[in-house]
Image: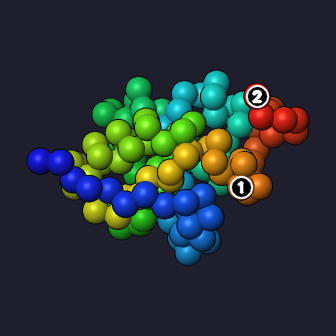
Amino acid sequence: MLLCMEEVTPQEGQQRMQQGALLVDVREQNEYDDLHAQGATLLPLSELEGRFSELPKDQELVMICRSGARSAQAGEYLMQNGYRQVVNLGGGTMAWAEAGLPTEGTASQGELS
């Protein structure tokens, strides 16, 4: 069964975080270290199957990756495993940074390549 996940803009994602949602970055550690949305929690897609139970079911989850594809995949997986409050951040970290929202990491000081 394919579940339909809502997609939000970076601004909506940030707003939801301010209202208590958890931003979950599913990229790998090195990508996260380079640049990530401020406040994001790292849970690499490669570790999701073994670690998804660490994520709260009673809190909205905003999934993010580089461009939105891996986070959509992760969100679908979570929804198939009983999570109901899951949205995908369209455009991912690239869109977040382009929107001028706060970022952290080694690349956040300079230009995005």
Residue sitting farthest toward the bottom: 19
Identified by mark 2, the residue type is Ser
Q: Compare residues 64 and 111 and report the one nearer the observer.
A: 111
Q: Left of 57 or right of it: where is 20? A: right
Residue 17 visible to the viewer: no
Residue 42 position within the rendered picture, expressed as x and y whole percent measured from the top left: 55, 40
Residue found at x 37% / y 35%: 48
Query: In the picture, which quadrant includes the C terminus?
Result: top right
Q: Left of 27 or right of it: where is 32? A: right
Report helix, strand or loop for mark 1.
loop
Residue found at x 50% / y 65%: 21
Residue sitting farthest toward the left: 1
Q: Which mark is residue 99?
A: 1
Of labels 2 and 1, earlier in sequence is 1
Q: Which mark is residue 113?
A: 2
Q: Left of 82 or right of it: where is 39? A: right
Residue found at x 63% / y 48%: 95
Identified by mark 1, the residue type is Ala
Q: Is residue 11 above or below residue 90?
A: below
Residue 7 position within the rendered picture, expressed as x and y whole percent measured from the top left: 43, 57
Q: Is residue 49 above or below residue 63?
A: above
